[in-house]
Amino acid sequence: MATPPLPRVYEAMLRDHTRRHRQMAFVTGPRQVGKTTSCRALASPSAYLSWDNDDDRRVLEAGPEAIAQRVGLHRLAKARKVVVLDELHKYRRWKTLAKGLFDTFEDRATFIVTGSSRLDVYRRGGDSLMGRYFTFRMHPLSVAELGHARVPKATIRPPKPIARADLEALLRFGGYPEAFAERDPRFHRRWLDLRRQQLVREDIRDLTRVQELGQIETLLRLLHERSGSQLIYSNLANEIRVAVETVRRWVDTLESFHAGFRVRPWSTNVAKALRKEPKWYASDWSDIADPGARAETFVACALLKAVQGWTDLGLGAFELRYVRDKLKREVDFVVVHGRKPWFLVEVKVADTKLAPELANFQAQIGAAHAFQAVMELDFVDADCFAQTRPTVVPVTTLLSQLV
C-alpha cells in the first residue's frame, strides 16, 4: 500500500494565498522536495499543466488563450480557479507567458508556477513581473513542520515534540518526503545517487550552458564533504583545476538549483570581524559522515527554512548569517531580523558546557537571545525565547518553535 502524502505547511500557505491574494505564487525548491504533490493538490479540476508532459507542453507553447481553453477560464464559475503550471521555468519564454496569463485572466484564476531552479526574474531579460507574484521557497521536512503543519501567525510558536521514530528518520534519511517516508537504507542510497545524477546530468545540463559536467560533479562532491566549512574559492579552483571565477560561477549555479546554500558572515559591531568568506551547507544532511558537520548542516537547513518562510509570509525581512572574528572565535549562526541580530545559535552534538563565544558575541552585536543547541539533549517543553542570557537548549525544542 502506498504511503499517503505527508501534510505540508506549504499546502496551507498556498491555500491561504489563493484565498486572499490575486498575485501569482512562484513556488521554488529543490528537485523531489514535494512541489508537484503539494501544488497539484490545490489545483482546480483539469487545471494542472506540466512542462514535462508532451501534451501539456504544446498547450503551454500555444500561449494564454490555449491555456484558458484547456482549463476552462471562459466558463462561468462560482469562484476563481487555481491553475498550476509545473516546471514552467524550463520554457525559455516562461516569464512572457506568465505575464500574459496574469494580465488577461487575473480576475478568473490564481496561478501557481513551480520551478526546480530559482524563478529569478531580475537577473535575466524579459518582461518585468513586478507586483504580479509572491515567492514561496519550499524546503524539505523539518522538526517544526512535522510538529506544526498549519500557517504560523507569528514568528515563534510554542515548543512541540515529534515522535521519536520521526526524529530518527529525519536525522538518518533527511527531510525529502519520499526518502523520509520509505525509511529504507538501500532505497535511500539509490535515491541519493539518482537525485545527484539528475541534478547535474539533466537539470544543469539542460538549463545552463555549463559543459564540464564531470568537474561540476567533483565540485558538488567536495562541497558536500565540507558542508559547514568556509568556502575558499581559490582552494577549490586548484583542486578542480579551473579558474577561480569559474568556480564562483559554478557555485552560483549549484546554489540556484538548491544543491546547497551559502551563509555569509555578519560583521556589524564585531571587533576584528571576518567580512568576506561565506560558509557552504549542503541541502541534504542525511549522508554527511562527520557527526559535527551533520548536526550543523541539519540546523542550518532548518534555520534557512525558517528565515525564508517568515520572509515569504510577510512577517518581516530575515537573514541567516554567521559570526567569526580574526582570532577565529565563531558562533555558527546569527538570525537577523530587520537588519538587526535577533538570536545566535551554536550547534553541538553532545557538549553542554556553555561556549564562551555566545556571551562574547551577544554582547557585541546586541542579539536578544543566544542558544547552544545540543543534538543529544531530549526535548524540553519550555520556551527557548523566554531566555535572554546564553542558554543550553535541546535542538528539538529550539527547532520546533520555528516554521
Image (cartoon, rainbow, N blue to C red):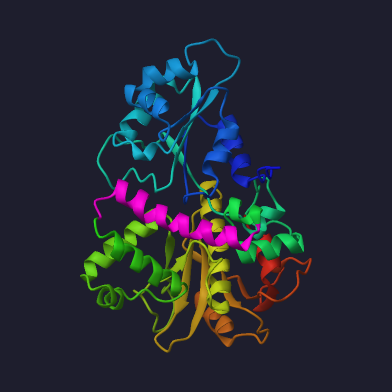
Q: How many marks?
A: 0
Q: Is residue 20 visible in this depiction of the protein?
A: no
Magenta highlight on residue 59 = no
Give above or below for 156 relative to 98: below
Residue sitting nearer the eye, 318 or 100? 100
Tell me residue 296's x, y (percent). 55, 73
On screen, residue 334 versus residue 102, left or right, reads right
- Residue 209: x %, y % from top left: 24, 51
As displayed, is residue 377 above or below residue 107?
below
Residue farthest toward the top in the current orientation of the protein: 76
Image point (50%, 59%), residue name: 192
Secondary structure predominantly adopted by residues drawn in magenta: helix
- Residue visible at 42% across and 39% down in the picture: 87
Q: Please tell me in which quadrant of the rendered image residue 280 appears.
A: bottom left
Q: Does the magenta segment cover residue 207?
A: yes
Furthest residue to the right?
Answer: 381
Q: At 37% from the left edge and 21% from the top edge, which residue is drawn? A: 64
Task: Please tell me which residue lies in front, 165 or 202.
Answer: 202
Quick check: can you spot residue 335? Answer: yes
- Position in image of residue 329 (x %, y %): 48, 86
Question: Toward the viewer: 176 or 350?
Answer: 176
Quadrant that contains the C terminus: bottom right
- Extreme-bottom residue of the structure: 327
> Residue at the spot x=44%, y=73% of the render?
225
Give the residues in magenta.
183-210
Where the N terminus falls, by quadrant?
top right
Q: Looking at the picture, how far across and down is residue 162, in whole percent?
A: 74, 59
